[in-house]
Image (cartoon, coloured by chain):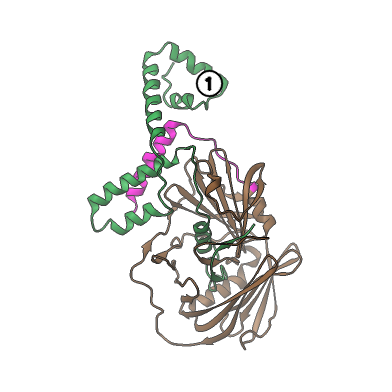
Chain colours: A brown, B green
Amino acid sequence: MRRVVPLLAVAVTIGLAPTAGASAGPLDDARRATEKASFNGSLAVTWVDGAAVRETVVTVRCDHGEMTIDGPVPIIKTFGFHVVRMSGGWTDLAPAGAIRQPSTSKYTVRRGDGPVVAGRPTVALHVFHRARLRESVAVDRELGVVLRREQLDDRGALVRRVEFTSFEPNTGTTRSGMPKQFRAESASVMGSRVPAPYRAPATLDGGYERVGVYRRGSVIQVVYGDGVYGLSVFEQPGHLNWDALPTAGRATTVDGHQARSYVWPGGRLLTWQAGGSTFTVVGDGLPADVLAAAASMRPARSLSTGQRLRQTARELVETLSRG
Amino acid sequence: MNHLGDLVSALLDGELTAGERAAAEAHLAGCPDCRTEMARTAAMRSLVRGLPPIEPPFGFVEGLVRADRRRRPAAVFAAAAAVAAAVGLAVTPRSDGVAPPVGRFVEAHATATPGGDPVTNLGPPSVLPVSFRP
């Protein structure tokens, strides 16, 4: 019997990123159209959780790109960042706009006639990888806003679906109310040069390309994109405390290292220790691609005491220098 | 021959190759300055590793510095220095290890990925409780 461990909260990722290369055009157009749109709607989210199919409905209000999502964990999103209501109040979780778009052309997009969604005609964008359909996106013919997304597995079965069940364009000017104060938990942005013992390789197997690096204390988050899906690698110097992990995991190996694997509603998570560091990979792409990316992480040589002391001093200076 | 410098700590940590180690030990045998340096480094290492483990929560340093910097610069500087030092000490591998906050990592991923938005970026599509299964 599978165990489900409820944790705090937040967003499910099926992660269709704005894309580049051969597939950049129509998907990027849809993203930009939504950033300018104003509407109210109800969004049904369906995902497969083992043998069960689960669904929830959230309401969405968007006013010229400032979006409020009233779900179990409210989110306010604007161009630069996301603000998520956590147990302690509003928290800015997303680093401010330092993500670049991957240049990969891993996927191709074909355009066709789409279904009627929420009473509105659409254009269909079919996303293929190696001639296999991975995503179907229905875009509003009039506004260009995405009205439905479906992610499929290797056999073509539904993995996740996001669909407006009601959609009403409006021209109102009422702002959704960005909170004036919230906890600043966004990460600091790092450049392309990442100090030892962190690795942050520019590319990972599975077609992933590094698009951003962030730091929270001693943890760095390296964000990758493959043109459609996202993947984050969290690097923590130190040995993994296996006893501190959620129990609902499966033992596996990553590049020969003992690892723990989890499935969450938006994808897959792997954590393991190698070379004196602990790695955690969170990905919303195909499981095989996430595994391939994780296995291509090579640990750095461990630091000497002197290097660790210098690193501590550097972290102190960097932390105090940040505004 | 130059003094050992950084090789002292590497030697103490057993991270030199056999050849490097032999050369370093030969130098130590004839260099009182490097022997003194090695003794001091060993003492410092014992001190650092003997401190109790402190692992600040995910994002704590940034939150502390950004939230309070404007109000009490001196106090915040001192507090941040202490916390940053704790972060640095946490970097030193310890027997009790690090505990990845996997739930927060999922959140951070969901809000930072290239498509990190439910609708506008065609990205993470919804707001759901994070749960795990094998």
Q: Please state the chain letter of the residue tagged with numbered disc 1 in the rendered image.
A: B
Q: Where is residue A166 in the image (x, y as percent from the top left)?
A: 57, 85
Residue B120 in view, yes or no = yes
Query: For the point 42% across and 10% down, which residue is it?
Result: B30
Q: Which contiguous range is marked in magenta?
A: A295-323
Q: Which of A161 and A133 is in front in this view?
A: A161
Query: For the point 39% across and 36% down, which residue is it?
Result: A310
Up the image or down, B106 lies above or below A78; here it is above
Mark 1 Cα within 10 Å, few/some/many (few <14, many 20+)? some
What secondary structure is marked by label 1?
helix
Up the image or down, A59 lies above or below B131; here it is below
Query: For the point 50% across and 84% down, which residue is it?
Result: A40
Residue A323 in view, yes or no = no
Q: Is the magenta stretch mostly helix, strand or loop?
A: helix
Q: Which amino acid does label 1 sit on?
A: Glu
The N terminus of chain A - image quarter? bottom right
The C terminus of chain A - image quarter? bottom left
Question: In terms of image quadrants, where is residue A187?
Answer: bottom left
Q: Where is residue B93 in the image (x, y as percent from the top left)?
A: 48, 37
Question: In terms of image quadrants, where is residue A20?
Answer: bottom right
Residue reaching furthest to the front: A1
Q: Position of residue B46 (x, y in %)?
A: 40, 29
The number of numbered discs placed on residues in the rendered structure image is 1
Q: In the image, is residue A158 part of the stretch drawn in magenta?
A: no
Q: In the image, is residue A312 part of the stretch drawn in magenta?
A: yes
Residue annotated with mark 1: B20
Query: For the point 51% across and 80% down, which residue is it?
Result: A59
Residue reaching furthest to the top: B30
Q: Where is residue B16 in the image (x, y as percent from the top left)?
A: 53, 25
